[in-house]
Image (spheres, helix red, strand yellow):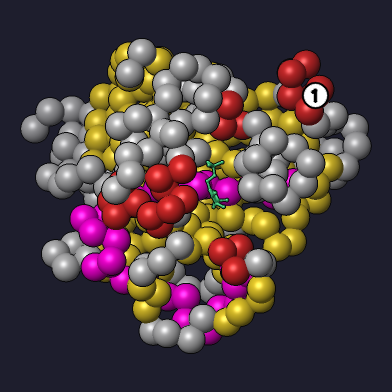
Amino acid sequence: MASASIDTLDFRGQPAISLATASGARAVVGLFGGQVLSWKPAGGEERLYLSDSAVFDGATAIRGGVPVCFPQFATEGALPRHGFARNRAWAVRTRRTGDDFAMLALGLDADDATRALWPHDFDLELTVLIEDSRLELELEVTNTGTDDFAFTAALHTYLRVREVEESRLEGLYGSEYRDSADGGKLKRDSGDALLIEDETDRIYHAVQRPLLLREYDRSLGINAEGFPDVVVWNPWETRCAALPDMAALDFRRMLCVEAAVVQNPVRLAPQAQWWGRQTLVAL
Ligand code: TA6
């Protein structure tokens, strides 16, 4: 068996790190945005959606993989949409491999450009861990300044699906959600599985259970800790056609299931820390 490895590579013209385990699990993480761009469990296929027309220019947010939204989710405040962490170059902090895992930690600190948008000092660390059939992403936020700050955040995970209309997302039964595709109305999920048959843009509040994304021949377990909310997004036909960095029919190949903290922003005192984690398990 090959041994675990961590290497630097050029991914569509941008610096990235590849991770591999001895059993053959693989991931690619781009430094721009601290963004996981690819994940293949051992012996398996790609599980993340990355648009073929995503822009890799070191400035534009990348359509696909796992964008990090910080310090603002979507348009929840006055900052650019989804904050600025997805548009910044992150730095490599730690690389580690073992018999059955590969782990990478990337970091992002405040600088003059972030302070011009958001006047706070912070430290972000994203840890990416792959094992046989598992991808674990942990985002840690530290307030390194002298005043309190509040933030919303998400791991905006783009899952690859064979056909979105034949996928079922289980585990949201009974959860309250804000329906952004229907004027922000508050609703409650009442089906035993969420089927995607139209534009879907929902923020589920305080989800207690792990989720299961079922396809006809495979499933994916999705678990979150620290992130109380779950966002489910598919732009469907009309909105997808309007996205310049996504092919017209690609809404059929993806579903965003995001670990988020939106409903109740996190407030951090100086030196305080918060963390949230999303774990995907290929089944
Ligand atoms: O997480 C869902 C969402 O906030 C949607 O409203 C949707 O427009 C999306 O994110 C993508 O945002 P982006 O700025 O990456 O085009």
Residue 279 shows in this picture: no
Residue at the spot 41% in from the left edge and 66% down from the top edge: 198
- Locate residue 249 relative to residue 256 in the image: left or right: left
Q: Is residue 204 above or below residue 254?
A: below
What is the crowding at mark 1: few (fewer than 14 residues within 10 Å), some, or many (at least 20)?
few
Q: What residue is drawn where x is 60% and y is 69%?
A: 182
Quickly name the residue at label 1: 115
Q: Where, quadrant-wise, is the N terminus in this rendering?
A: top left
Depicted 183 relative to depicted 67: above or below:
below
* Residue located at (83% from left, 42% from top): 149
Q: To which quarter of the image does residue 29 belong?
A: top left
Say how many tags the image has: 1
Whole-percent x, y for residue 234 in the image: 43, 57
Residue 24 in the image: state x and y as whole percent: 16, 37
**In front here: 54 or 126?**
54
Q: Is residue 173 magenta?
A: yes
The structure residue drawn at horizontal position 37% and vertical position 78%, both measured from the top left corner, is: 193
| Picture quadrant where residue 263 is located | bottom right
Above or below for 207 versus 129: below
Element marked by disc 1: helix
Q: In this orientation, does residue 178 appear?
A: yes
Report if residue 143 lies within the magenta region.
no
- Which percent across, then down, holds residue 8? 34, 15
The residue nearer to you, when weighing 22 against 36, is: 36
Indicate the amino acid at tag 1: Arg
Q: Which residues are magenta?
A: 151-179
Q: Is residue 45 left or right of residue 260?
A: left
Q: Quadrant of the C terminus?
A: bottom left
